[in-house]
Image (cartoon, helix red, strand yellow):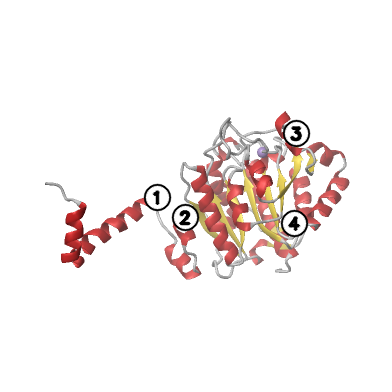
Amino acid sequence: MGISALKILKASILFPHAVALIIIPILVDYNRLKAPTGKLYLEQAYLKAGLNKARLYLIENPYCFSGIRHDYEESWFSVIGVPFDGTTSFRPGSRFAPSSIRLFSTEAETISLDDCIDLEKVPVSDLGDVAVTFNVEEVLNRVETVCGELLGDSKIPVLLGGEHTITLGAVRALKPDLLICFDAHFDYRDEYPQGVKISHATVMRRISESLCRVVHVGVRATCREEVEYAHNRRFLTSKQVLEDFSKASEALKSIVEEASRLYVSVDLDVLDPAYAPGVGNPEACGLSTSMLLKLLDCSITDRLVGMDLVELNPLLDFGGSSTAAAVRILFQAIVKTAREKGLV
Ligand SMILES: [Mn+2]
């Protein structure tokens, strides 16, 4: 004879404690099944820091960004990896970038002679990686939740992708009014592949439709649909930057002046494949690393609310030049932001 709902109801009236003892462990186990599979949760640190939901979505990474550990409470910037490349259409592998960037960052020097600021002086905490799933919307929800809690704690999120789609989750939480997108591509398709609204090739379309203004820098490879969508929208092509750098950098400065909440996204394929071969979709005739660093200097203001570096694919980065460039870009962007905000 089976156990009917009526019998459970009767039993719970007659023996409430006994039923609770059976039901509660089942519910707890069910919630555990829903939690991400990670070796260690940073429960203590997150509880101490008052992070609630975000804690469930973060798992520890064996490496720490820059190799210098700062407590969450004292940090101004928080690094979060998002090892997701689930919609990558050509050459997947950017899921390995958060670990690779951290490993290279521990070996990179922290002082840049150009601006004489030591990254060690800037408190950056590393919260580990977002536990990703195969469902892109769920990944974006988790990124949004984590970034939202960081925003509430007045931290500046620094996201390590992963593919470019993750930017959508950060923008939903941080609500910038301007996104400067360094990228060889617009990512302005309405659907890609056909019928799919959210992917690495549509992410800037979704953001620009309803969330904030997007200005591309270094863009050079596109399709007819994107050209039509980009009409009347602001962008600086790779050729414009290469042919008249000072004009392009002045234009960029005047664009960011208008922003009250700025987000900077660096798709590493904005660099020429000679500098960064380790990307999913390389495109010829891109920027040099030093050019990108100068343009970053022009685009970062004290109104910056978040940043990311995406699309590095360590599986294709045979000499390590792309990962080394990614680390230098992140170090400089963090130091420049700290200086603009008057923190150092
Ligand atoms: Mn791209």
Q: N-terminal of the two: label 3 or label 4?
A: 3
Q: Element at badge 2?
A: loop
Q: Which residue is mark 3?
A: 227
- Position above or below: 302 against 169: below
Q: Which residue is mark 1?
A: 37
CA distance separating discs 3 and 1: 42 Å
Residue type highlighted by circle 2: Tyr
CA distance separating discs 3 and 2: 37 Å
Residue type highlighted by circle 4: Ile
Q: Element at badge 3?
A: helix
Which of label 3 and label 2 is nearer to you?
A: 3
Q: N-terminal of the two: label 4 or label 1?
A: 1
Q: N-terminal of the two: label 2 or label 4?
A: 2
Q: N-terminal of the two: label 2 or label 1?
A: 1
Q: Which residue is mark 2?
A: 57
Which of label 2 and label 4 is nearer to you?
A: 2
Res 191 quadrant in image: top right
Give the class, few, some or many, for how many residues have Cα within 10 Å of label 1's Cα (few <14, many ≥20): some
Give the class, few, some or many, for how many residues have Cα within 10 Å of label 2's Cα (few <14, many ≥20): many
Q: Which residue is mark 4?
A: 300
- Position above or below: 44 against 263: below
Q: Element at badge 4?
A: loop
